[in-house]
Image: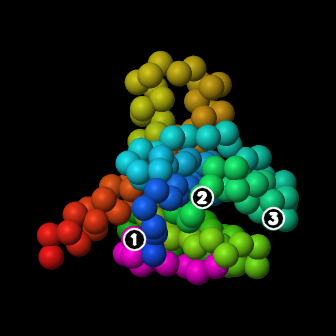
């Protein structure tokens, strides 16, 4: 497995390959999957965290089922751009995944993704209880959609050269 920039990921991906977005929390892992055209991010069921080995197995099982070619994982950078303990934990999770899969990972700045996801769920009049169940996958969709939009932009720029 490699850790790639979004630009490196764009160069490596083949047409018609889905990618997954991840929002790594302390209790759950939010999961979102792109369509094969990599235009839309769709939330999937959250993965309840147990311990790393179990979490990795659940994540890789979902990746196999969805035929995922790469992961985009939210990096919880502080608002001032610094990296705190949650960033360190996310980077450690990805380093540990290197032993488990050849699939590449790309980090994506996830500042405000959970806030944006919660606003959308509130606008959809989702109850507080259901919001709590769906927030991590909704945040994963915001993370993935941002990356998909950037990949599309890179593809457009590459075609205009």
Residue 12: name its quadrant. Answer: bottom left
Residue 11: x and y in percent read 39, 76
In the displayed image of the protein, which residue is found farthest to the front?
A: 15
Residue 132: x and y in percent read 63, 33
Q: Residues within 10 Å of mark 1 (few under 14, many from 20)?
A: some
- 123 relative position to 94: left or right: left
Tell me which numbered mark, 3 or 2, is placed earlier along the sequence. Answer: 3
Residue 92: x and y in percent read 68, 75
- For this rendering, which residue is in front, 98 or 140? 98
Q: Answer above or below: position of 129 versus 40.
A: above
Residue that appears at 53% across and 21% down:
126
Tag count: 3
Residue 15: name its quadrant. Answer: bottom left
SS type, badge 3: helix
Q: Which residue is mark 3?
A: 52
Residue 21 in sight from this viewpoint: no
- For this rendering, which residue is in front, 149 or 12? 12
- Which numbered mark, 3 or 2, is in the foreground of this view? 2
SS type, badge 1: helix
SS type, badge 2: strand
- For this rendering, which residue is in front, 91 or 53? 53
Gap in angstroms between the C-alphas marked 3 and 2:
20 Å
Residue 1: x and y in percent read 64, 79
Residue 35 in sight from this viewpoint: yes
Tell me which numbered mark, 2 or 1, is placed earlier along the sequence. Answer: 1
Residue 68 has which mark?
A: 2
Q: Which residue is mark 1?
A: 10
Residue that appears at 60% across and 58% down:
68
**Which residues are the magenta region?**
1-11
């Amino acid at each position: 497995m490699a850790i790639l920039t979004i630009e490196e990921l764009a160069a490596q991906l083949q047409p018609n390959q889905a990618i997954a977005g991840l929002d790594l929390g302390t209790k759950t892992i939010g999961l979102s999957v792109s369509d094969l055209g990599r235009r839309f991010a769709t939330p999937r069921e959250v993965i309840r965290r147990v311990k790393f080995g179990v979490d990795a197995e659940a994540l890789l099982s979902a990746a196999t089922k969805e035929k995922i070619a790469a992961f985009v994982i939210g990096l919880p950078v502080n608002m001032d751009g610094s990296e705190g303990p949650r960033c360190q934990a996310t980077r450690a999770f990805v380093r540990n995944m290197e032993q488990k899969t050849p699939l590449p990972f790309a980090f994506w700045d996830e500042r405000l993704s959970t806030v944006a996801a919660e606003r959308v769920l509130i606008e959809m009049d989702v109850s507080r209880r259901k919001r709590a169940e769906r927030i991590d996958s909704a945040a994963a969709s915001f993370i993935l959609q941002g990356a998909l939009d950037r990949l599309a932009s890179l593809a457009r720029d590459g075609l205009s050269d």
